[in-house]
Image (cartoon, helix red, strand yellow):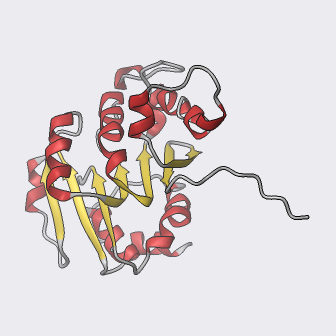
């Protein structure tokens, strides 16, 4: 059992619902933030356990933010500082107002409603508010294959299918003719990698590097 899994079972006191393979992905991508100044936003607070998990795993230097559409989350009590806001993740105006007030984040985790509209609106609204060096995680992406969630196999509206098109963005300097839209290029400026897991996609953002050949003679 890795440490983050041990924390989940032995230190988290509030209810949390995670798929078991997620823990390895969390540890792989988020361990670099442990015990460092950072800011994490999780969409989908539910019963509050996952915010506890991030506090115990990332440490006291991490500022924790949560967003949920259920007003009952405002009644959650913690023995550490948490900033929880009630809002609709499918509403671009909500995100515009929210980020104007709360600024940029180092880690963003979308564990919200998991519909295609929610996931697509949220990443378009928030990826630009991810700091360089940051990680953006979208969970439960198996809903991309469920029609009653707005998805379907190879549906153009599914989050997975839209994400596939971002592979072109990683190779933008090599495309000589037609390119992705300027809006998409600006929105995902700094996208450096995408890692696909069963039911999870992890995006990494870095300061764009010059693509130059290095030859060791």
Based on the displayed image, in which of its 4 quarters is residue 189 positioned? top left
* Residue at 29%, 69% in the rendered image: 52
- Quadrant where the image shows the N terminus: bottom right
Q: Vertically, is 28 above or below 124? A: below
- Quadrant where the image shows the C terminus: bottom right
Q: Vertically, is 178 above or below 171? A: above
Q: Looking at this rendering, what residue extends furthest in the right direction?
A: 217
106, 65: nearer the viewer: 106
Where residue 62 sits in the image (x, y, percent)?
31, 74
* Residue at 47%, 28% in the rendered image: 162
* Residue at 46%, 38% in the rendered image: 141
Where residue 116 sits in the image (x, y, percent)?
36, 29
Q: Is residue 189 visible in the rendered structure shown here?
A: yes
198, 123: nearer the viewer: 123
* Residue at 35%, 79% in the rendered image: 59
212, 22: nearer the viewer: 212
The answer to whether residue 41 is left or right of residue 156 is left
71, 186: nearer the viewer: 186
Based on the displayed image, in which of its 4 quarters is residue 97 positioned? top left
Q: Is residue 47 visible in the rendered structure shown here?
A: no
Labels in figure, total: 0
Where residue 69 sits in the image (x, y, percent)?
16, 43
The answer to whether residue 26 is left or right of residue 131 is right
Where residue 192 sits in the image (x, y, percent)?
55, 50
């Amino acid at each position: 059992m890795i440490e983050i899994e041990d924390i989940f079972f032995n230190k988290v006191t509030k209810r949390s619902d995670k798929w078991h393979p997620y823990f390895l992905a969390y540890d792989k991508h988020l361990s670099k933030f442990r015990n460092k100044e950072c800011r994490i936003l999780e969409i989908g607070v539910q019963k509050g356990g996952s915010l506890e998990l991030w506090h115990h795993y990332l440490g006291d230097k991490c500022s924790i933010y949560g967003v949920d559409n259920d007003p009952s989350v405002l009644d959650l009590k913690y023995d550490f500082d948490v900033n929880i806001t009630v809002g609709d993740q499918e509403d671009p105006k909500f995100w515009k107002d929210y980020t104007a007030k709360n600024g940029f984040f180092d880690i963003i985790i979308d564990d919200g409603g998991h519909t295609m509209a929610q996931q697509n609106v949220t990443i378009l609204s928030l990826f630009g508010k991810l700091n360089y060096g940051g990680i953006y995680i979208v969970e439960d992406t198996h809903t991309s294959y469920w029609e009653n969630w707005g998805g379907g196999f190879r549906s153009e509206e599914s989050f997975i299918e839209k994400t596939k098109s971002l592979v072109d963005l990683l190779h933008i300097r090599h495309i000589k003719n037609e390119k992705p839209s300027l809006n998409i290029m600006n929105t995902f400026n700094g996208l450096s990698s995408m890692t696909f897991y069963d039911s999870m996609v992890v995006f990494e953002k870095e300061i764009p590097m010059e693509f130059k050949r290095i030859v060791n003679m």
